[in-house]
Image: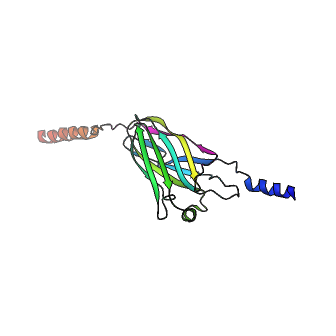
Amino acid sequence: MKKIIMLLTMLLVSFNSQATLLSVEFNQDSYQVGDVLTADFIISDIEEDGLGFQKLLASFDFTLSWDNSIIDYVSSSFGNKLNVGVAGSDQTVFDIMTESVTLSEISYAWWDEILPVQDGLSQFVLASVNFNVTGAGTSILGLTNVIFGDDFGASFTDVSSNNISFIVNSSVPVDVPEPMTMVLMLVALTVLARQRKLN
């Protein structure tokens, strides 16, 4: 009997070894100067609780950094999977530096309001950030201080994130001269017209 109780306890308290992942997806593969770069921040491989059920995400916080010589921050927006129920959520964009921004959201909804929105989803968008592309080159969006919290206020135990690079192609506008064939054709027509007058 003692062994059975120990076995059941170990099964109920076992933890999932898979890390919850925060990844970034861009709206394009490459960019030109003047384009708008949109980065979607997506949570996936969501951690499971001790019973093997996927945890409900109720809060997140992460810092995003970039190279200001290539892109300029424009705006942020948040997803719709935490801002549910009567109480909604608190969404914060904090930018203390010119090359970084901290995004955080805390849901005040009860678990039974979050469950129908997140149940069965393997991934979803937490936030989106828009940048104006101002220079050419290759750069990285860096993710740091990534924290996820569940509906009981506990932090996720294993969280990972991927920094992602993007390419901006040089596309300085070049003045295109009028085709020289038009000038040559005009000269040829003038010569023909003069020859007809002489004859």
Depth order, front residue of 95/24: 95
Q: How is the image coloured?
A: rainbow
Taking the magenta stretch, the answer to whether it contains residue 102 is no
Q: Is residue 118 visible?
A: yes
Depth order, front residue of 167/83: 83
- Residue positioned 57% across, 55% down in the render: 57
The segment highlighted magenta reads 154-174
Quadrant including the C terminus: top left
Could you tell whether 104 is left or right of 154 in the image? Answer: left
Question: In x, y percent, where is residue 21?
Answer: 60, 47
Could you tell whether 90 is left or right of 121 in the image? Answer: left
Taking the magenta stretch, the answer to whether it contains residue 170 is yes
Q: Residue furthest front?
A: 2
Q: How many marks?
A: 0
Occupied quadrant, residue 118: bottom right
Question: In x, y percent, where is residue 130?
Answer: 41, 47
